[in-house]
Image (spheres, rainbow, N blue to C red):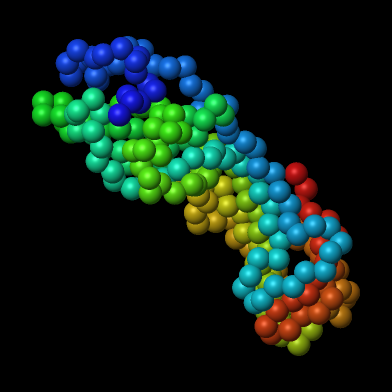
């Protein structure tokens, strides 16, 4: 099988040459990263969600596309290695991630390697396409959820997520509950966002977003 793209295409002499390679192919995975900025739903459209579902979501984070690989044992240059985890897809089509040596005497040595798409498909035919969040301080996700009605009072939960782990948002960093009285009007406001309530019941809410969260 063709050697992974990290290595020169010349024959490698022994384990040391295999582990060090002949110098990496210049691949810049970061060039494929993208900035995700999204406000949903669209202003002015009529939407409906069930109790406990998200009414509004604002996303602002950096993401990268790639593939998740289950533990896969392969042979490179006739020597055993393990592939596992997330492999980032670069803009020029390479999949870059970690490979762990199982060669006697160097077992556990971890290398970062980049495969062409054809090589990646040959080594890991069962990989799953994935997108993960790149950890950085500016990542944030704001959410409003409808939590119920009692007579004329509507309750909502506002949450901010800015902590990520393994490429996904985890527990909210900030949560606050709000109560609104429909007798005072059908427009509600949370953290700068504005929503017009059309109908609210114990099972769901119909509404229009008038203004998204400020950036």
Front-most of 148 and 97?
A: 97
- Residue lying at the far bottom in this picture: please name it: 151
Q: Judge by depth and name the residue closer to the eye, 162 or 100.
A: 100
**Residue 180, visible in the rendered structure:** no
Count the numbered circles shown: 0
Give the residue displayed 50% in from the left and 34% down from the top: 89
Quarter of the picture containing the C terminus is top right
Vertical relation: 90 (above or below) 9: below
Residue 161 visible somewhere in the drawing = yes
Residue 152, compared with residue 118, is above or below; it is below
Considering every residue shown, the one lying at the far front of the view is: 1
Q: Say which residue appears at 31% left-offset and 12% top-offset.
A: 10
Q: Quadrant of residue 138?
A: top right
Rendering coords of residue 63 (x, y %)? 57, 40
Work out which residue is located at the far left of the displayed protein and give it.
104
- Note whether 89 is above or below 185 in the view shown: above
């Amino acid at each position: 099988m063709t050697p992974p793209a990290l290595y020169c295409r010349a024959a490698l002499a022994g384990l040391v040459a295999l582990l060090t390679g002949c110098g990496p192919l210049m691949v810049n995975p970061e060039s494929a990263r993208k900035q995700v900025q999204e406000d949903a739903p669209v202003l002015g459209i009529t939407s409906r969600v069930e109790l406990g579902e998200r009414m509004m979501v604002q996303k602002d984070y950096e993401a990268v596309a790639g593939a998740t690989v289950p533990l896969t044992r392969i042979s490179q240059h006739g020597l055993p290695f393990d592939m596992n985890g997330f492999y980032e897809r670069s803009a020029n089509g390479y999949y870059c991630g970690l490979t762990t040596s199982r060669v006697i005497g160097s077992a556990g040595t971890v290398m970062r390697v980049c495969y062409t798409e054809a090589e990646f498909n040959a080594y890991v035919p069962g990989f799953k396409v994935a997108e993960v969040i790149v950890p950085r301080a500016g990542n944030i996700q704001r959410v409003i959820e409808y939590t119920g009605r009692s007579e004329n009072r509507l309750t909502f939960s506002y949450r901010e997520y800015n902590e990520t782990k393994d490429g996904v948002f985890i527990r909210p960093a900030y949560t606050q509950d709000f109560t609104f009285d429909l007798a005072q009007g059908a427009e509600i406001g949370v953290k700068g966002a504005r929503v017009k309530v059309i109908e609210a019941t114990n099972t769901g809410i119909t509404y229009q977003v008038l203004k998204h969260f400020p950036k």
